[in-house]
Image (cartoon, rainbow, N blue to C red):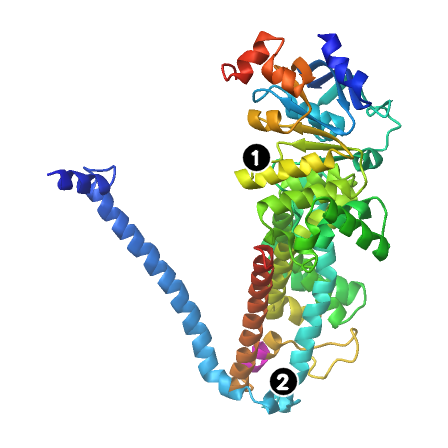
Amino acid sequence: MARDAGRGESHGRGAPGRPKKRSGVLGVALVRASAALAVAILVFIVGYIMLRGARLMTPRFLFGSPEKMGREGGIFPSIVGTVVLTLSSVAVAAPLGIGTAIFLTEYTREGLFSRIVRFGTESLAGIPSIIFGLFGFLFFVIRLGMGWSILSGSLTLAAMMLPTIVRTSEEALRSVPDIYKETAYALGASRWQTVTSVVLPAAMPGIITGVILAMGRAIGETAAVIFTAGSSLRLPKSIFDSVRTLPVHFYILAREGISFENAYGTAAVLITAVLLVNLAAYYVLYRVSKRRAGGI
Amino acid sequence: MKEAMEKPSSQVKAKVVARDFRLYYGDFMALKGLNAAFPDRSITAIIGPSGCGKSTFLRSINRMNDLIKGTRVEGEILYEGKNVYDPSVDLTWLRSRIGMVFQRPVAFPLSIYDNVACAPRVQGITKKSELDEIVEWSLRSVGLWDEVKDDLKKSALGLSLGNQQKLCIARAISTNPEVILLDEPASALDPIATLKLEDLMWTLREKYCLVIVTHNMQQAARASDYTVFMLGGEIVEVGPTRQVFTNPKDPRTERYITGKLG
């Protein structure tokens, strides 16, 4: 008897809650299934492309020059183009985005101006990438006469990355405990010193993760790049040269039916690159959090 | 009562003196005309129930309340005879002379070395050899040097809470202050770490004027020379700790100390 009573109690507050419990089971099953499905989709896409493209990832393909419009040969210029374009867009977007985030979190109270800045960056995030491409084409390529080049492409990509970097940096900066700032002030630090010597270092892992994730998106960007960086198959010599990034190369190979085999090879390289970048982001976060948890 | 308040200052030189100090949050008067003197080379404990204004009073001394919008002060807090609220006072200077240690150990997510060195750096010291010297001296002063000297590059967050709080004290004294304000410094520590911290306070007492806010009555009784008892934004009683605890003049002090108030 006593045992029964105890068991009844342990089953929860809802004694007449049998149907409730069943709906809980159903709910858990549903969320489990969604999670499994999400993973399955990812595995399927990555697996399918890798299955068709991985065998092409030979040194000759990776480090060779394309021949016959990419029907034969390798993709080396596209790899170089993608790396250079991505890095230069980060070089533009990261300082700008982190600066904006510092301004929003540390140097302004919630007001009309900060709301305008935040609204602006968030609107930027909602604009389809092809619009960025069109804008970049009209403004950088034509109006400023930069032509199809790494410069035009990276400035356009930077504008696209900006919202992500601003938002993640802002979040990272806001999550720095107020007591850190207070302590810095108590040591006589000015606001600027507090930001640079305490707040920024404390927020760095979050900021770096945000930047790397934005980079991952930039690597795969196609529409904005094809309009602004062009599609030259030559190895770029300066930032004023046009490049054909991996996704653009893939798009052209597939769209124009040049070589589906090489298209899948390119896609495999691209996916590997994106996965590596994401892994790098998690590695940074893991290293830093481990060190912070006390690696003495 | 006025006599009692100024008694400490007549015995030892007072480092910090509050004169009819009032602090307002908007229209609300949080500190209602405080008079107290904090003598050099001794520990003064400020006690009182939650919300009595003891932390606010402590934070008024190095002007930390300036950070809160809508605060306004009247009266004076004198450090070295000068009103800290005088417009000519440089806050960086003031806070380098009056160090502060908070409730929870606030170790920055930086190395042990940088945690201490950031304070002199704020004061404009950048020379490596000079910083090295300050870091070593500060860590030695709190008895942490031997334990961490080989781990200076490691994260401070790996230290135990007790050692983190010592590190915070090392940082607070690295700018060579004369006054150290401690805002319930042991509230996050276990009893053993608390006793070690109190030992450290007794050592530091040789050189500094320490002011500690505590809600732990035993701690105040154990680890202070003078006691200030506050209630509702006012100072009720000031005196040598022994006297306040064994023979309080005000019945409210007695009731608080015996646990019948607050």
Q: Is residue A105 visible?
A: no
Q: Badge 2 is on which residue?
A: A75
Q: Is residue B120 above or below residue B16?
A: below
The residue depicted at 73 percent of the width and 25 percent of the height is: B60
Label placed on residue B187:
1
Q: Quadrant of residue B233?
A: top right
- Between residue A220 and residue A291, name the one nearer to us: A291
Q: Is residue B35 above or below residue B100?
A: above
Q: Which residue lies furthest to the left in this view?
A: A1
Is residue A255 highlighted in magenta? Answer: yes
**Residue A274 location, x and y as percent?**
56, 71
Say which of marks 2 and 1 sits in front. Answer: 1
- Between residue A195 and residue A113, name the one nearer to us: A195
**Residue A11 location, x and y as percent?**
22, 43
- Report the chain holding disc 2: A
Q: Quadrant of residue B236?
A: top right
Q: In which quarter of the image is residue A212?
A: bottom right
**Residue B240 location, x and y as percent?**
68, 18
The residue depicted at 52 percent of the width and 14 percent of the height is: B261
Crowding at label 2, few (<14), some or many (≥20) Cα neighbours within 10 Å?
many
Residue type highlighted by circle 2: Ile
**Quadrant of the snapshot with the N terminus of chain B:** top right
Q: Give the range drawn in magenta.
A: A250-256
Q: Is residue B260 left or right of residue B121?
A: left
- Report the chain holding disc 1: B
The residue depicted at 67 percent of the width and 32 percent of the height is: B182
Is residue A60 highlighted in magenta? Answer: no
Label placed on residue A103:
none
**Residue A143 location, x and y as percent?**
79, 63
Instruction: For mark 2, give the secondary structure.
Output: loop
Instruction: For mark 1, give the secondary structure.
Output: loop
Residue type highlighted by circle 1: Ser
